[in-house]
Amino acid sequence: MKKIVDRDGCVLSGLDGKQKRHNLTASLAVALFFVISAFTFMNFLFVLSDCAGSIVCASPDVALRDALRSAPIILSFFLTLSGLMTAHTFYRNESPDILRKKAKKHATIGIVTGTVLIVYVTVMLIAGRYLSIVEGAPSPLYPLDSVLYALAFVAAGIGIRAYLGKAGDEPLFCGPSRPTVWKKGRGVRSFFRMIWLLTGLYGFCGFFYSFFIVDFRVGYVPYSVASIFVSFIAFISLPVWEFCYNNLTAEKRMKKTLPPAILYLAVSLAATVFYFLALKKNLDGPSNVGFGLLPIAFSASVNLATLFVVAVPLVVSVAALVKGIFRRIKAKE
Amino acid sequence: MKKHLICFITAAAMLLSFVGCSAVQKSSEHLEDYVFNVQYHDDFNILQLTDIHWNVNSSTKASTAYLDKLLEEVNGHIVAEQGESAKIDLVELTGDMFMLANSYHLKTFIDYFEKKAEEYGFLYAPVWGNHDRHALYSPNKLAKEFREAPHCIYFEPNDDLYGRSNYVINLTEDGTADSAVAWMIANIDSGASFSETELSVSRDYDYIRPEQTDWFISEHALAGEDVPVIAYYHIPQDENAKAWTEVTEKGSDIKNKYFKLEDFADNGKEEFASDFIDRAKDHNLKAAFMGHAHNVDWTFEYEGVVVGLGVKTGTELYFAHIDADSEDEAMRTGLKSVGITEDFDLIGASLVTLTGRDGSFDLEHLYFNERENGDFAVWVKW
């Protein structure tokens, strides 16, 4: 069997042409699905925020009506997430067995979610809950666009299952292998990584949209810049982690944990301090210049969600710092 | 590499400083800029639509179908009451037209109102609500679209006034600035919300700031001290809650009517109380109408000024279901005041008819619900 793992510093060193191609395809797929997941997550948050607003204002009937109408938006997020997870499984390629098992699982989730979405829209149309297949809002083609999106995922899911089924014992995918997630405390790790991922998606979308919706009005520049900076810090750790840190071999990672952790902590702290100074300068900034970036915070008229976006990078960097210190001590022993 | 980085940071800082340094207009030196002139006639009809709240979950098809029927009902009512030539003259959109919306909603909304303005012959004037700033479009885009819409009256200068847009519509004899002003309509941005400190967990709803009141008084002086005024804005100011306390706790004999089924959602703090009505009432303010709290259309008369919330338009976000058999004191009081004996939803519109140049006007609330066996439409006079 071809050696697909190179632990000589970087997992990308010494790859042949086919391995490079597979690695590039998997990396691009992860990046693409991350971006699409971010946009679908923002839509999901918008739906959720509006429904939460209705519930808070004692109109659960309106919340239910809206949730039923927007279920395809909610399902589209989970659909995209299944795509991200599938692509990520290939990218990590922990072992041929894990790859086959996990990729099949995520592809199946995509097929099931997509099918549910298509059936749901069909039933809603027949029941007259949608006035037309292109009822409009939030896009001109809604809910038809959701159906087409789901169809693409169902087709892709079937394709992936067929690809993995065809492989038999011979690995069809030969991209580099990256370290496995530790079995110890896997559940807790997965939970916190999911929070990290969701905050990263939120941050990426906020960062992207901020160039279009943040309003640099006179007097609001500090807050506008701070909100862009905080969004950036909220997501940047993810690509650094995935595309830089995880390309190191396990030995290298043991040595290289501490410096980026210290750097990220410093940047996160700077972002937090900057954010609060900007807020002090523009106490009405959040609600006046592009609060579309923070839908939950605005709906609830509280600053908690904003604090959450500021806090998660701090938690991530502190966790990385603790890990780095622990590894350094262990290495000395 | 270092040099490049320094250049990049310097360029970014310069760019940002330029953004923050564009010229700020002094409102007191450009009072005429804030004025639109529209021709006045007796029985000038102003329809208030408020809190339409198009959002990511809205069906624009369903919502416009509701608005179609609502406008038809209002137009029919006006024609029946005032004659064939009467029409809706002005539509005041008193904030929260959107919430968690995107550019598609924005375009569809303006296209719709342009079409209806053409059909019924009205102009429309939007006022910012707290949620209109809360979307996946830039607030600048919303402002630009409104400015460019042919039937929309809107103005947003880069000025020293609080809020994005404060402007007045002077109803003059011939529709130009050359003739006498019969009525003034003041459209004021009551803001959104603010933190008391940078560490506050909660936020307070905004209020009309003293400099906006100063500006209003200057605009009124320009139009003429005797000109009667109606103000439209989004967030209720402190007078509403104070009047409610006077009526319910002190038993004051203040004329009041309609429903009050939740708080007014003002900031409720004395230090952030607005001086607008207190000072504007000495400048011929006849009425002030707003939105914001969907389960309230309670209206009262305070020292000669009629102050009240418009009826929430449409079914987005939340609205009250009125139960004719309810034991709830507030609902029973509201029902008694409007004389309706069946269940209905507290949605519809409000209509003001300016009956004379002396400051007289009529106010009616329309409760309009779509129903399969014939729509529910009840008009209740103030």
Image (spheres, coloured by chain):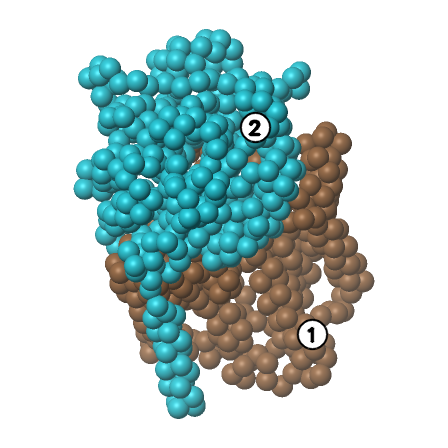
Chain colours: A brown, B cyan
Is B288 or A239 nearer to us in this picture? B288
Image quadrant for the N terminus of chain A? bottom right
Residue B342 in view: yes
Residue A301 place in picture, x, y as percent:
36, 43
Image quadrant for the C terminus of chain A? bottom left
Which amino acid is tagged 1? Answer: His
> Who's the residue at 57% across and 62% down the image?
A34
Name the residue carrying label 2: B86
The chain letter for the residue carrying disc 1 is A
SS for callout 1: helix
Query: Badge 1: how crowded within 10 Å, few (<14), some, or many (20+)?
Result: some
Q: Disc 1 and disc 2: Cα gap in Å? A: 72 Å
Is B64 or A227 nearer to us in this picture? B64
Which amino acid is tagged 2? Answer: Ala
The chain letter for the residue carrying disc 2 is B
A232 sits left or right of B286 in the view: right
B40 sits left or right of A282 in the view: right
> Who's the residue at 26% across and 55% down the image?
B198
Name the residue carrying label 1: A22
